[in-house]
Image (cartoon, rainbow, N blue to C red):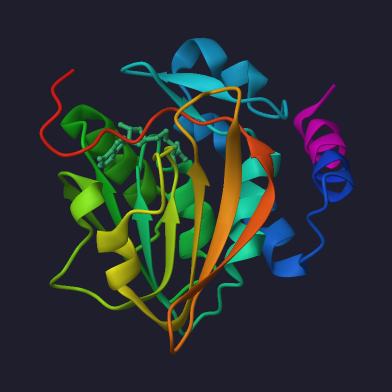
Amino acid sequence: MNPASQMAKLMLELRQAGITEVGVLEALEVTPREMFLPEQFKDRAFENVALPIGHHQTVSQPSVVGLMTQALEVTDRMKVLEIGTGSGYQAAVLARLCRRLYTIERHPPLLEQAEDRLKRLGLVNITALTGDGTLGWPEQAPFERIVVTAAAADVPEILLGQLAEGGIMVLPVGLDERDQHLIRVRRTETGAETEDLGATRFVPLIEAGVED
Ligand code: SAH
């Protein structure tokens, strides 16, 4: 199959997975996923599967990236925080939809590669940081949206504290790989409302102070 028909097939799969927002579909369509993959996986860029990106990490399947992005209800006026830059693919998709994206990755070589890719794509509204994302980015808080692309045991309180009132955070919760759920949290005047968006599977969010 040529790239155009491979992309058409993927777009159909994304719609079938429940991605209906035109803006989100367009952002996925214009983001060249092969650019975010190691050499040996580039030819699988159009497959709706998670793929290894090195350092025991994976880039999510496009439908999961799409569903998380859609669940965030991002607009071009918003400041968004991503925890777990990884390959930079989710960052590239989000940066097309928001005003400014802040992204944190704990593995310096992954972040360096990701920043290079994002720069080559001309995405200039991204600020990246190497560090522990469980601490958030207090200097830039509050954020209208927060997305965590690694699984925590629970909703991290520090991140909830950096979410603007009325803001949305989307994240996988659950340390058992076979029992993880994608959760959407809306911060309200009085606290937070939580919604279960269904079963999912992510690499773990490494808590502060852990070495690997
Ligand atoms: N959004 C990424 C997915 C990467 S997988 C993409 O589109 O490719 C999750 C990433 O979270 C990994 O790169 C991992 O190193 C990172 N991570 C895990 N715990 C972290 C922490 N505490 N702070 C920052 N990044 C973390």
Give the residue at the far front of this rendering.
190
Q: Residue at x 60, y 41 (%)?
A: 181
| Foreground residue among 176 and 39 | 176
Q: Give the residue displayed 66% in from the left and 54% down from the top.
A: 196
Indicate the position of residue 15 as horizontal and vertical percent values. Answer: 85, 50
Quadrant location, ligand no. 1: top left
Give left or right: position of 114 versus 149: left
Query: Is residue 122 in the magenta section?
Result: no
Q: Is residue 178 left or right of residue 47?
A: left
Residue occupying the point 86% across, 35% down: 9
User: In what quadrant of the picture does the N terminus appear?
Assistant: top right
Given residues 22 and 34, the one toward you in this image is 22
Residue most extreme to the top: 40
- Residue extending farthest to the bottom is 189
As drawn, 50 above or below 193: above
Can the viewer see residue 137 in this picture? yes
Magenta stretch?
A: 1-10
| Location of residue 200 in the rendering, given as x and y in whole percent from the top left corner | 63, 35
Q: Quadrant of the C terminus?
A: top left
- Residue in front for this viewpoint, 177 or 109: 177
Where is residue 24, by image quadrant? Answer: bottom right
The vertical placement of 113 against 127, above or below, is: above
Q: Is residue 4 magenta?
A: yes
Of residues 41 and 83, the one drawn nearer to the viewer in this rendering? 83
Q: Residue placed at 21% from the left, 37% from the top?
A: 106
Residue 62 sits in which quadrant? top right
Residue 153, picture quadrant: top left
Residue 185: percent from left, percent from top: 52, 65
Magenta stretch secondary structure, dominant: helix
